[in-house]
Image: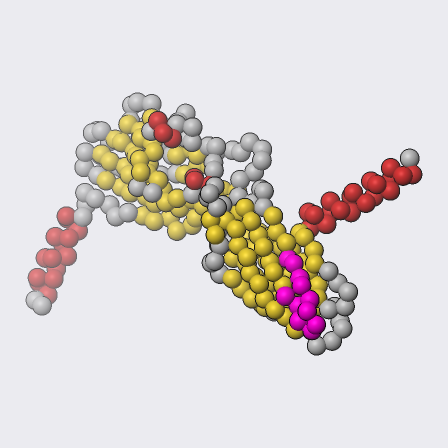
């Protein structure tokens, strides 16, 4: 191709691209870990700088391409009625009149707060788009246990977790940190949107020594895991998770204390 033609085409592309900036994707997912007590708002910022400060300015927020919030410069922001209990429309993100209510303050989060969020900033001559992913983690009411069933020299380990969000990954690990079995994505969703998952593996005991195993429940992008323990071989037995073990210990000592009194 003629070098002069390449230069002309390149200049033309730069001139035409000045009115619409490309969408920016914030690859870091915002995690919201649900708690039983009141939580601070989760704020999603919409970063932009506009050149056209004379014409109108609107900022719209979407979740999974559905409009949930809108602000027009010079007016009070207005969440869509369906989402008025999910957004703090009084939150001010800046003293700059061009950015005063541009952020999205999420309140009262549930698992349905999870989604792909997008803010779209528009003026008379510019359109700017920003993306942000939000992932809710809810393990407040989970149950987890690692059962064992021994038949001769074989022990069947069954790990069961229920009532967690999002989809979990179950991994059974030996005491040597060897992965015995990993169940990547085979959970079932219940009617409330939470997930239940089970994984089963058979291990073989070649001696009478006690072997320890743990079931680790993990979630993509979240650093904390749920863990249950069990032993095979000897006279060991399976355990429920640590919380149940602690409850049993406390109950035992309280019952002894009652007898002494």
Q: Is residue 200 above or below residue 190?
A: below
Residue 98 magenta: no
Q: What x and y, as percent, mark residue 241? A: 66, 52
Q: Quadrant of the N terminus?
A: bottom left
What is the residue that sits farthest to the top in this orientation?
75
The residue shown at (70%, 58%) is 238
What is the residue that sits farthest to the bottom in this orientation?
206
What is the residue that sits farthest to the front in this orientation?
151
In front of the other: 102 or 117: 117
Magenta stretch mostly in which secondary structure?
strand
Q: What x and y, as percent, mark residue 117? A: 36, 42
- Is residue 101 visible in the rendered image? The answer is no
* Left or right: 106 in relation to 177: left
The residue shown at (76%, 73%) is 208
Q: Quadrant of the C terminus?
A: top right
- Is residue 204 visible in the rendered image? The answer is yes
* Total numbered badges shown on the rendered structure: 0
The residue shown at (24%, 45%) is 21
Q: What x and y, as percent, mark residue 15? A: 15, 48
In front of the other: 211 or 203: 203
Q: What x and y, as percent, mark residue 219? A: 51, 53
The residue shown at (55%, 57%) is 198
Q: Is residue 37 above or below residue 150?
A: above
Q: Which residues are magenta?
A: 146-156
Colour mode of the rendering: secondary structure
* Left or right: 116 in relation to 166: left
* Left or right: 34 in relation to 60: right
């Amino acid at each position: 191709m003629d070098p002069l033609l390449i230069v002309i085409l390149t200049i033309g592309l730069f001139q035409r691209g000045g009115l619409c900036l490309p969408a920016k994707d914030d690859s870091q997912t915002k995690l919201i870990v649900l708690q039983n007590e009141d939580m601070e708002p989760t704020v999603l910022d919409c970063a932009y700088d506009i050149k056209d400060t004379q014409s109108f300015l609107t900022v719209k927020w979407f979740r999974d391409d559905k409009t949930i919030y809108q602000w027009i410069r010079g007016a009070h922001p207005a969440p869509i009625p369906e989402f008025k209990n999910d957004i703090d429309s009084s939150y001010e993100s800046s003293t700059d009149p061009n950015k005063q209510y541009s952020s999205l303050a999420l309140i009262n989060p549930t698992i349905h707060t999870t989604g792909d969020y997008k803010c779209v900033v528009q003026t008379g001559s510019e359109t700017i788009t920003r993306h942000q992913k939000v992932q809710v983690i809810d393990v407040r009411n989970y149950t987890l246990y690692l059962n064992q069933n021994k038949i001769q020299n074989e022990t069947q380990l069954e790990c069961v977790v229920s009532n967690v969000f999002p989809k979990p990954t179950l991994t059974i690990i030996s005491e040597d940190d060897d992965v015995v079995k990993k169940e990547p994505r085979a959970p079932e969703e219940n009617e409330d949107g939470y997930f239940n998952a089970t994984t089963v593996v058979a291990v073989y005991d070649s001696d009478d020594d006690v072997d320890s195993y743990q079931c680790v429940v993990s979630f993509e992008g979240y650093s904390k895991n749920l863990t249950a323990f069990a032993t095979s071989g000897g006279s060991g037995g399976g355990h429920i998770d640590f919380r149940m073990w602690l409850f049993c210990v406390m109950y035992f000592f309280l019952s002894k204390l009652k007898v002494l009194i």
